[in-house]
Every structure is written in structure tokens, then in C-alpha cells.
Amino acid sequence: MSNDFVFGLHAVQAVVERSPQDVLEVFVSKERDDKRMNPLVQQLRQQGIAVQFCHRKTLDNLVQGQHQGIVAKVRLAQAGSDADLMAIVQQQSAPLLLVLDGVTDPHNLGAILRSADAAGVHAVVVPKDRSVKLTSVVRKVACGAAETVPFIAVTNLARALRQLQEAGVWVIGTAGETDQTLYQTELTGPLAIVLGAEGDGLRRLTRETCDALVKIPMLGSVSSLNVSVAAGICLFEAVRQRQL
């Protein structure tokens, strides 16, 4: 376990509701005395969590970003392991997984986690190296989704994908050079959708490990989408198909 700061109303409330035992103390701006902040402060006190009121500048010095007048010092759990991933797969009849190959921007990861939560994703999987971790910025952008979606960091991504395949999971990668589109592809059943890093796309070994490659049709002048946007499109096409 390590300590970090979680900031923003939604992010702090999420961690308080999910794991209040990991909240060490909370700093609240003296300037915030309103109907959005006061219920959260009351909830913190009911949980026996220490609340310190301070000047906004104190919060500005603790974190970088829009903290909305509240910062929590929390004990953060480590990311899940390869074994945790396989346990999740075994618990679900048709697991939906999102795999990120080298996404390094915390804002993108936060937005992806938010979409993953909305789509009912059972786990978001990243490699331990060349990937952003669950930082305070990620948690703020995720608006609470970082506390609800299992986050798994695997030692070797290609090996983890092969283990998923052996467990019956169909691994679909996204790549612009393929002819098959997302909308021509069956996305029901046990499924892992793999997206590449910003700008670089899937690494060669990751691409070769996938069962199939698909692309999102691009009809305009731009050649690619932001990875968080692409993740949302892919996930909700899978949701649409799985609800038919």
C-alpha cells in the first residue's frame, strides 16, 4: 500500500463510499460552504474521518488540477495482478475486458475508466511498464470510476493475452490498416478489446497476438481518434450487440 491524494468531489466521494477505511484525512477549503460540499463533509464525519478546513492555497500546494475545494489523503491499493485477471475471467460467463497497450496520458486513462464503468467492463488491463498508473489525476478525471472498475497491471501483455485466449476469450485489436470494421465484427461472448498507445498504436507483438484486427470507419480528413474516444466507441458497440 502507498499513500496518495485523491481530489475533486466525485473522486473523493467514490473512495469514501467504496473504501472509507483507506481515507486517512481530508482537507476542505474554508471557502466551500455550499449544498454540494456540506453533505460530503457530514458523510466524512459520520465515517469518523478527520476533516481539516484550510485555505484554498493549501489545497493548491497539495495537488495540481481542479480540486473543487477538497483533497483526501488516502491509502491506495496496488493494481491487480495476472492471477486477479484470470480470477475475474473465471467468475464471468461472458467477460468484457478492455486492454490498453501503452497508454501513458493520465487524462486519457481517466476518461477511459469512466467509459469502462458505464459500459460494465469487468476489468481494464495494462502492462506494468510503458503505461500510466492510477494517479490522482487519473482518479479525478475518472469521476469515481477508478474505484469501481478493476485495474490490472500485467507483467507481460502478450503472454496475458495468450492466457485469455486459452481461457476462451476472443481478443480483438484495433488497427487502422485492417479492412474489417468494428461494425462488421461480432462482439458478443467472452471478449477483450485491445487499444494501442496515443500515436503509436498497437505494438507488433500485441498486434500479432490478437485473434482479429478491426478499425473504426473514418469518413473525414483526420486519420485517427483520441484513444479515450476510440475506447468509448468500441465499448458501446459491444454493449449494443450484447443487449440484442
Image: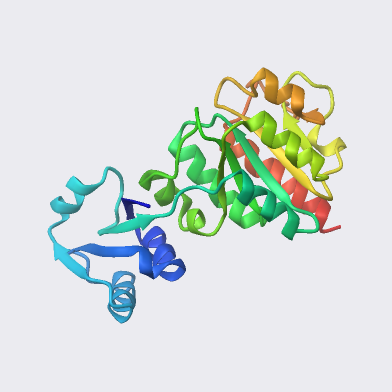
- Tell me residue 146's x, y (percent): 49, 53
For residue 22, side relative to residue 243 (left or right): left
Q: Is residue 46 visible?
A: yes
Residue at (51, 34) in percent of width and height: 128
For this orientation, the residue located farthest to the front is 83
Q: Residue at x 48, y 45 (%)?
A: 110
**Above or below, comparing residue 20 to residue 161 in the picture:** below
Q: How is the image coloured?
A: rainbow
Residue 211 is left or right of residue 175, and the answer is right
- Residue displayed at 17% across by 46% down: 61
Q: Quadrant of residue 94?
A: bottom right
Q: Is residue 30 visible?
A: no
Find residue 233 and report its image quarter. Answer: top right
Q: Position of residue 149 (x, y in %)?
A: 57, 55
Asked if residue 219 is positioned above or below residue 172 in the image, the reply reads above
Q: Nearer the viewer, residue 151 or 231?
A: 151
Q: How many marks?
A: 0
Relative image position of residue 182 (x, y in whole percent)? 79, 35
| Residue 57 horizontal side relative to residue 223, left or right | left
Coordinates of residue 47 in the picture (x, y in percent): 33, 78
Vertical comparison of 89 with 163: above or below:
below
Relative to 80, say whether 208 is above or below. above
Residue shown at 33%/72% (left/top)? Answer: 40
Farthest bottom residue? 46
Q: Nearer the viewer, residue 145 or 151?
A: 151
Image quarter where the C terminus lies is bottom right
150 left or right, relative to 234:
left
* Quadrant of the rendered image containing residue 107: top left
